[in-house]
């Protein structure tokens, strides 16, 4: 069965420091991969996505992610974190094989930013 | 452009009561979903629909029902509320292609006591 693992429940980063959030997926075919961000009291918003082509994808707010098939990973990065990046981040994979384009989410990583 | 709209934002129910969470979207998306979000668990799919008149169970359907009479609306029904249904509920819609993202509402926070 498809699954997504985010091994870090929470991460604390100093403002201006770099960030990497880890994501591993289990999927039998070429995956459709997504990163979403959730601010408190809000729904999830798309950061970026990958489904083919260049394995380094750019998203909104200066985020990028790299798809590594050999490691089944899709880690999210940002060179310099801003206080407004504090939020919860979800990695997700779309199951395009069983109908309904169901999205499977990881458990999320909460990012804390310290001044 | 409203996108996906959920009502109510908050609700407290007593055990055994019933309620309907409303969801409507104005993007003409055929695919719609209900997720529940619990701390540390990510989002779990309750039910989904691929078009008007078609619904199917997700990962955690027990205790819930849905209907889809129009493309725009996808209400979620709780018949006999239980404390285990205390959660934040999100409705989302999708264009129906693998590389399309989900569009989320702002959620309904439900407490069952």
Image (cartoon, coloured by chain):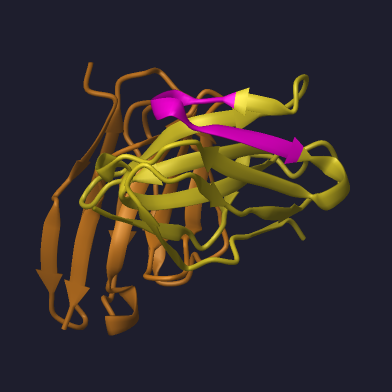
Chain colours: A yellow, B orange
Residue at 38% of width from left, 53% of height from top?
A88
- What is the number of callouts on the image? 0
Residue at 20% of width from left, 51% of height from top?
A41
Using the image as rendered, state which of residue A84 and residue A87 is in the foreground: A84
Using the image as rendered, state which of residue A68 and residue A3 is in the foreground: A68
Residue A103 seen in the figure: no
Question: In x, y percent, where is residue A50?
Answer: 66, 29
Q: Is residue A41 above or below residue A76?
A: below
Residue at 48% of width from left, 59% of height from top?
A108
Question: In x, y percent, where is residue B37?
Answer: 38, 62
Quadrant location, the N terminus of chain A: bottom right
Question: In x, y percent, where is residue B101?
Answer: 51, 30
Q: Is residue A38 above or below residue B42?
A: above
Q: Is A79 positioned to the left or the right of B63 in the image?
A: right
Question: In x, y percent, where is residue A65?
Answer: 61, 35
Q: Is residue B84 above or below residue B51?
A: below
Residue A39 seen in the figure: yes
**Does the stretch in magenta take in A62?**
yes
Residue at 82% of width from left, 51% of height from top?
A71
Instruction: Please tell me in which quadrant of the rendered image residue B15 appears.
Output: bottom left
Using the image as rendered, state which of residue A41 and residue B92 is in the foreground: A41
Q: Is B41 positioned to the left or the right of A73 in the image?
A: left
**Does the stretch in magenta take in B97?**
no
Region in magenta: A58-67
């Amino acid at each position: 069965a498809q699954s997504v693992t985010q091994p870090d429940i929470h991460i604390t980063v100093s403002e201006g420091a770099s960030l990497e959030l880890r994501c591993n997926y289990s999927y039998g075919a070429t995956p459709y991969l997504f990163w979403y961000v959730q601010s408190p009291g809000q729904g999830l918003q798309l950061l970026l996505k990958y489904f083919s082509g260049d394995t380094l994808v750019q998203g909104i707010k200066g985020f990028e992610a790299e798809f590594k098939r050999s490691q089944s990973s899709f880690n999210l990065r940002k060179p310099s974190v801003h206080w407004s990046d504090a939020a919860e981040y979800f990695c997700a994979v779309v199951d395009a094989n069983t109908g309904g384009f169901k999205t499977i989410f990881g458990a999320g990583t909460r990012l804390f930013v310290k001044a | 452009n409203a996108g996906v709209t959920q009502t109510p934002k908050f609700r407290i129910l007593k055990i055994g009561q019933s309620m309907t969470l409303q969801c409507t979207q104005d993007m003409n998306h055929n695919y719609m979903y209900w997720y529940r979000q619990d701390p540390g668990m990510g989002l779990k799919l309750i039910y989904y629909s691929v078009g008007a008149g078609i619904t199917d169970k997700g990962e955690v359907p027990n205790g819930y029902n849905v209907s889809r009479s129009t493309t725009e609306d996808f209400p979620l029904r709780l018949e006999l509320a239980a404390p285990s249904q205390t959660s934040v509920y999100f409705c989302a819609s999708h264009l129906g292609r693998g590389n399309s993202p989900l569009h989320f509402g702002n959620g309904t926070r439900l407490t069952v006591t």
